[in-house]
């Protein structure tokens, strides 16, 4: 599969009597790096949503038919992180967009791929403290505010 010119970010969350919990993942190639599910689109994926569903399934075992919501947050990711793909996209492609999604789950069951060493369900403050990338923090801020204000029920 050839890599598409975009990245996706997926925030799994669960609402329960204690409030809202978010699932964060520690990367296996960067032990101190916590993030949400992140991955590249594939040219075979018809839309970023399909990429998000595929990545969530591959990295966390989240069922493809789960309820995904696209967030307004988008970021730009430097293509220096994707040297092989950049060869395919051309030397003038310096940044690609990252589309953000949330997926509400009814249970905390996560099946990790080898891309992550562990996952944890944490509250908003803990997630904000641990997350490595600003794009993850901005998307989490948007999602948390949409849930708390009732925009996302």
Image (cartoon, grey):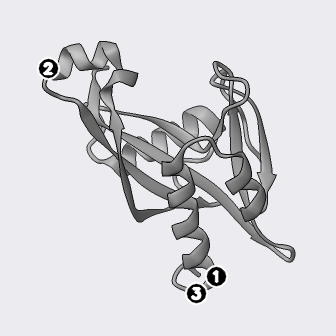
**Circle 3 SS class:** loop
Towards the viewer: 34 or 119: 34
Q: Are marks 2 and 1 in contact (CB under 8 Å)?
A: no
Name the side, left or right, on which 110 lies relative to 102.
Answer: right
* Residue 71, position as x, y percentages in the image: 43, 64
Q: Could one spot residue 6 in this view of the protein? A: yes
Reading the image, the residue beneath label 2 is 90
Residue plotted at (62% across, 41% down): 132
Alpha carbon distance from label 3 to label 2: 43 Å
* Residue 32, position as x, y percentages in the image: 72, 29
Alpha carbon distance from label 3 to label 1: 6 Å
Residue at far right of view = 18
**Badge 2 or badge 1: first in the primary sequence:** 2
**Label drawn at residue 150:** 3
**Label 3 neighbourhood size at 10 Å, few (<14), some (14-19), many (20+)?**
few
* Residue 91, position as x, y percentages in the image: 15, 19
């Amino acid at each position: 599969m050839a890599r598409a010119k975009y990245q996706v970010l997926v925030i799994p969350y669960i609402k329960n009597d204690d409030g809202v919990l978010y699932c964060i993942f520690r990367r296996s190639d960067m032990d101190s790096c916590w993030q949400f599910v992140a991955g590249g689109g594939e040219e075979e994926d018809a839309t970023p949503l399909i990429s998000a569903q595929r990545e969530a399934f591959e990295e966390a075992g989240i069922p493809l038919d789960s309820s995904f919501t696209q967030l307004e947050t988008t970021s730009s990711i430097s293509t220096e992180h994707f040297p092989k793909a950049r060869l395919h996209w051309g030397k003038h492609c310096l940044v690609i967009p990252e589309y953000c999604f949330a997926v509400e789950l009814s249970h905390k069951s996560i099946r990790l791929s080898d891309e992550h060493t562990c996952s944890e369900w944490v509250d908003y403050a803990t997630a904000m403290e641990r997350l490595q990338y600003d794009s993850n923090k901005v998307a989490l801020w948007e999602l948390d505010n949409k849930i708390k204000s009732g925009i996302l029920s």
